Image (cartoon, rainbow, N blue to C red):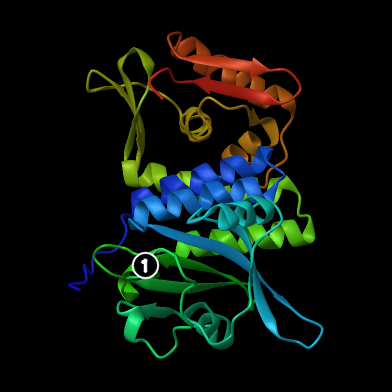
Amino acid sequence: MKVDHSPISEKLLLNAITTVLSHYITETDPYILFNGLLDTLLDITESEYGFIGEIFFTKEKQPFIKSYATTNISWSEETQCLYEKTKRNGMIFSKPNSLYGAVIKTGQLVISNAPASDPRRYGLPKGHPPLNAFMGIPFYGGGELLGMVGLANRGSGYHKILAESLQPFLITCGNLIQAYRNNLKHQQVETELNKYKKRLLILDKSTDLDSGYCFNHSPLRLTKEQHTISLTRKELKLLEILIIHANVPCPRSLIEEHIWANVIVGESSLRSLLRRLRNKLPEISIKTISGVGYMLKINNR
């Protein structure tokens, strides 16, 4: 097999992460969330099937994987029934002498582009789809091995560069499992989401708004038909945070922190700043969301 050693596009990866974290804000069922996560991961790595699971231990301290998401690769009525039975409660992977078992035992990346001759391979049940290539990647949180991602049958094979380029995705897996374990407040995930959105905007460099406006993210600048619109630094910062959260309500507290950092300001300061921005940009729709904050509407998104 000729292996393609290209990494995953950072922009493609960040788009996937922001989508997942956005869903976490409203989705409380990890099985729904992680199935969406797996579908995205299979798509961006061009893999045929796989799983995402958390590591648990038996009473005898033996590690095993309980999946949050598993591709449906049923090959008979019996295995389809098994899949339907376990897809909501998790499928158990408990064979230590296997490719995925090598990940659990070592806590290290495992790649095999010739599984049929790999001594770590356990074997496949009769009728199981072929396994032509495998990559098992562990993910951590708080210094602890939390789980792993298993991917199979990428046409151009797997390699270390590909695994390394997926690190932001794996960090997200670990953070989400920790969030479910510890029942963390949504604000903490929103903070992480905000960080990735900012990074994504920097990669994009500019954002097209309605009515021909274009917002440049580095340095902050608003133009229309290549002419710079005169805005103060605080007005640009207000527009920036609204663009980061375009088409969804942005809380007042988040806006104030973005503009004034650790300085405590009264509600009138934000209202006054918003009024000036609306007066300067009457074609831009900035809605007041009662009891929450404000929302910038961008029709081309």
Image quarter where the N terminus lies is: bottom left
Residue 220: image quadrant is top left
Tag 1: amino acid: Pro
User: Farthest residue in the bottom direction?
Assistant: 119
Is residue 212 depicted above or below 214 in this figure? Answer: above
Tell me if I can see residue 261 in this picture. no
Residue 200: image quadrant is top left
Horizontal placement of 68 versus 242: left or right? right
User: Observer-nearest residue: 145 or 111?
Assistant: 111
**To which residue does mark 1 refer?**
130
Residue drawn 71% across the image and 86% down it: 62
Residue drawn 45% across the image and 47% down it: 16
Horizontal placement of 188 versus 151: left or right? right
Residue 164: image quadrant is bottom left
- On the image, the x and y values in percent for residue 294 come to 62, 23
Is residue 291 depicted above or below 144 in this figure? Answer: above
- Tell me the SS state at disc 1: loop
Residue drawn 26% across the image and 62% down it: 155
The 10 Å Cα crowd at callout 1, few under 14, some 14 to 19, many 20 or more, is few
User: Observer-nearest residue: 248 or 255?
Assistant: 248
